[in-house]
Amino acid sequence: MLATLRTPLRALRRSQWTMAQVMAKAEEVHAVAFDPAKEPDVKIPQYDGMTGDLSALLTEPRPSSYAPAVARQERPGMNAIGESVLQYVGNTPLIRCSRLTKHLGLECEILAKCEYFSAGGSVKDRIALRMIQEAEKDGLIKPGDTLIEPTSGNTGVGICMAGAVLGYKVIICMPKKMSGEKVNAMKRLGATILRTPTEAAWNDPDSHITLAARLQKAIPNSHVLDQYLNRGNPLAHYEGTAEEIIQQTGGDFTHLVIGAGTGGTLTGTARKIKEKCPHVTVVAIDPVGSILAKPDKLNDHKRLEAYQVEGIGYDFIPTVLDQDCCDAWLKIDDPEAFQHARALIRHEGMLIGGSCGTAVAGAHKYIKENGLGKGHKVVVLLPDSSRNYMSKFMDDAWMQANGFNEPEL
């Protein structure tokens, strides 16, 4: 079996494989433990935080050589007919959470940027589409090719959705911790799903990132877009998400709160907000167990211990994350994240995901610690939908079985 992994692919790359061939090879690779000596061409990506070249693309004035892959997208009007769901990626509403603030006894305003209104149900729709557009513009991919992505789920859903519309085969490499709802959605969109151990470090031989690198070498006409270092990730937010928030508020807000996953949403949005609205304080939220917060001592409590909230936090610093783009970092643990997610659903009717609770809990904590009151307007980005977590924090039995017995807020 290992011999087939070393077979030269030059001839194979001249023709497209069928989806059945792709799936068979993916399962074959997945079934064999990685041995660098037997697969010497496999290179594990190196992530060392923000690079100078990427930083330049997120700073005005930008390099004269840079041209966006696409113009900023706007949705068709309510009286127009859309050509595909991809026209409905992004351009999400900003909603005043007056019922939640009253319930929590807060005098400031909380404004929720509701990314679950995007076509695929999360903020990651934006980067999935943008990464594909960037790669098409650069001549790196074409319909019929295979896209491989290591993901915690939402980027995978976005890539699967775009792949279904644009004609790409998709393989998703995803840790076992992630919800079955995400897996089922991606399968229905036509993807092959390969699960990896939750406890594997990002660069372990059996991690989702290592598996993606191996598959790319074994399958002809395949490409790893790699959200952790792809410029399309922060650019989607620098040129899109941030501009929407500025347009929706007219620049009249005082704080921006965003959870950190890959860091692309945080970095791209914060960079543009700081340029156009320098009066705004940007607060980044990192789950307890992750190591993204700065200064690093913030990460000491439960450092690298497992946590239940999905889609945010990592055990390495992605290239697309500028840890210095914000004014403050806060850490939020699972219990308060799920408390706040359930409270937001109950009092605002917003069907949001667990990491949204992390962001709202972080906003609540910052508001209380800094005495924010009347006149303060706090924008909180809510990354995804409760669709992905019906069998997890939405379920009382799951909460109890996993030791989350805290009273409702």
Image: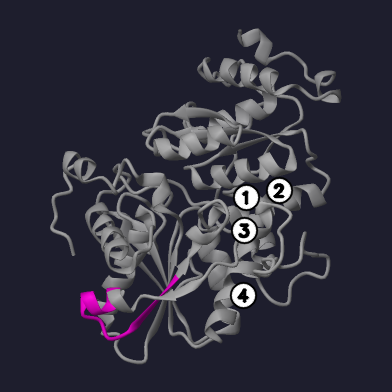
**Left or right placement of residue 16 versus residue 233 in this view:** right
Task: Examine the rendered structure and indicate whether residue 336 appears above or below residue 60.
Answer: above
* Residue 251 on image: x %, y %: 54, 86
Question: Where are the magenta residues, as a range?
Answer: 100-112
State how far apart marks 3 and 1 are (Cα).
Answer: 10 Å
* Residue 136 on image: x %, y %: 79, 48
Q: The disc labelled 2 sits on which kind of residue?
A: Ile
* Residue 167 on image: x %, y %: 74, 38
* Residue 292 on image: x %, y %: 42, 56
The residue beneath circle 3 is 89
Q: How crowded is mark 4: few (under 14 residues within 10 Å), some or many (20 or more)?
A: some
Residue placed most toward the observer, 94 or 218: 94
The residue beneath circle 4 is 243
The residue beneath circle 2 is 132
Sequence-wise, the earlier of marks 4 and 1 is 1
Q: Where is the N terminus found, in terms of image quarters? A: top right
State how far apart marks 3 and 4 are (Cα).
Answer: 15 Å
Q: Where is the C terminus found, in terms of image quarters? A: bottom left
Q: Answer whether residue 297 is visible to the viewer in this image.
A: no
Q: Residues within 10 Å of mark 2 (few under 14, many from 20)?
A: many
* Of the two numbered discs 2 and 3 in the rendering, the one whose residue sits closer to the viewer: 3
Sequence-wise, the earlier of marks 2 and 4 is 2
Which disc, if any, is residue 128?
Answer: 1
Q: The disc labelled 3 sits on which kind of residue?
A: Val
